[in-house]
Image (cartoon, rainbow, N blue to C red):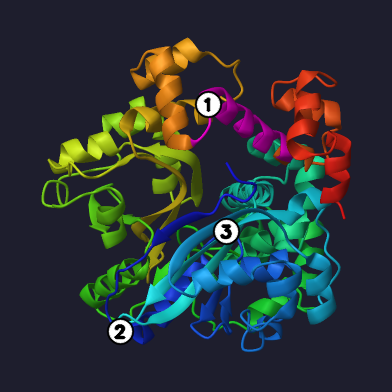
Amino acid sequence: MSEHDLHNQLADSSFSPLAEQQDFLFAVLELFPFPTEVFSSEGVSLFVNSVFLEFFNLPDPLEIVGKLNILQDPYINNQLGFSDYLRRVFSGEILSYYNIRIPFEEISYRYQSQPSKFTEEDMYQDITSFPLWNEDGALAYVVTLFMTKRVYQSGLDVIKAREYIDTHWLDDFDLDEIARHVGLSRHHLARLFKRFIGMTPYSYYQEIKVGKIKEALSDTSLSIREAFASCGADYGGCFAKAFKIKTGGLTPSQYRKTLPNEPGDKPRNMGVGEKAAGVPGPLRLTSQYSEYETEKRLFQTAELFPIPIQIFKPNGDIAFVNDAVLRMWNVLDTSQIMGKYNLINDPFVNEQFGLRDYIQRTFRGEVVMIPDIRIPLENFWEWYKTRSAVYDIEAVYSDILNFPILNADGEMAYVMSIFFTRRIYQGRADIAKSREYLENHWREEFNLANLAEAAGLSPSHLVRQFKKHTGMTPYSYYQEIKITHLKEALRNKNLNIAQAFISCGFRYPGNFARFFKKRVGMTPSQYRKTMNK
């Protein structure tokens, strides 16, 4: 395995005029909970989502959009060494580049952004780029995703905390309970929340509470004290002062006088997933188009993606799969599943595959990432009644991003699932199975007998065939996997070197420290120092 494993797949799909889909496309990309950027075919930045701005501490997207040309940037192409990667990406390939150090200092220098608050271990990302094509087959856009597992997981933790506050706004604020719900210490959660949301958890809670009080005050059948009480607040307490601060100096009674005086009006309830304080919520399908036209535009946008996408109805019935699903998973006929398959009711996915909790959270309206899941191709082929004899992919592992799409009334209209391929095992079935086994059991002691049993070969025959088809023995392949994971652990400054070794199943110092030096050409401590330059 190489230091920066490049996963390459040619994309060849096209659909309706892309210009007509741009607004919908950007709205979908705005939902991604990691930094996302879109470039024109000439390399000019056209779009960055809000997470991109937050991650790089950029106050204004126009500092990049319309100004940066990534193909002509000498720093990115020469100093970072991305010229070959970009050449291939803008030739139409889907490429992933792993463990790239993000140059915060350079970004701060160029765009006068605020100093980054990220620690050094958060500066390494997996970058995935894929093309989008015009209807005439010409390259229209390149979409680039910056996916850092640690930062992204932190982002998910903050989303989970935010959603907890959204649904418990009527209760008294309890940071300890929120931290327990998320599984973090209260101090770490507070720091992450401020980093990603721009305010403390309590300030966010106040924003929601004040918003609810404003809604209650619009109901003139309630006295001001009753309006506060209906929102779990004491009119004579701290929220009267917070209300005045949040409304620019207006007292509750002054604020009420600014509202239309229509007795009996009830406050509007927030829809599923709607956020307070300007925080982006889920994609909404506006009433600008008919229901049929809206659905058509959504499906057309999904069809633009050369990576697999499935769309489900709120009851779990499958509504759409794009062409990339059919090509990646070797599906020739959708008639066996469209209108027949229900994700919520699928016992294999929920029970045997262990995804019930993920699926339940998804259909409750959460943004959910399911990490590194083996796609059950065998089951798909059984459902679809097809598998080509020349199809050589034996297993696909993906991160699956699930998020809700709301209608104009704030109700869930669809759930979209996007599959980001992490690794593919292909070629001879027995060799693919043995590689897959080693990737999934790298923490364990090497056991040739167990590996041979998984591949369905005798140990001696497996060693010969594995070396013939991969160029190395199974044990050497296993060692390379270990080295890769150890390098990743050494980048985590929260771990000392001994802890990094222990996290990968080694003792430090020990035999593997010597092997590391022989294989990498430097000691673990020297390697760590080079990563911090």
Q: Residue tagged by mark 1?
A: 473
Cα–Cα gap, marks 1 and 3? 40 Å
Q: Secondary structure at mark 1?
A: loop
Q: Judge from the rendering whether residue 472 lies leftward or rightward of residue 236; answer left or right.
A: left
- Please state which amino acid type lies under the numbered disc 2: Pro
Q: Residue tagged by mark 3?
A: 33
- What is the crowding at mark 1: few (fewer than 14 residues within 10 Å), some, or many (at least 20)? some
Image-quadrant location for residue 457: top left
Tags 2 and 3 touching, CB below 8 Å: no
- Please state which amino acid type lies under the numbered disc 3: Pro
Q: Residue tagged by mark 2?
A: 17
- Residue at image coords 56%, 30%: 477
Q: Judge from the rendering whether residue 449 lies leftward or rightward of residue 325; answer left or right.
A: right
Q: Main secondary structure of the magenta part?
A: helix
Question: Horizontal and vertical percent for residue 264?
Answer: 46, 71
Q: Which residues are magenta?
A: 471-487
Q: Secondary structure at mark 2?
A: loop
Q: Looking at the image, is 372 positioned above or below residue 227?
A: above
Q: Secondary structure at mark 3?
A: loop
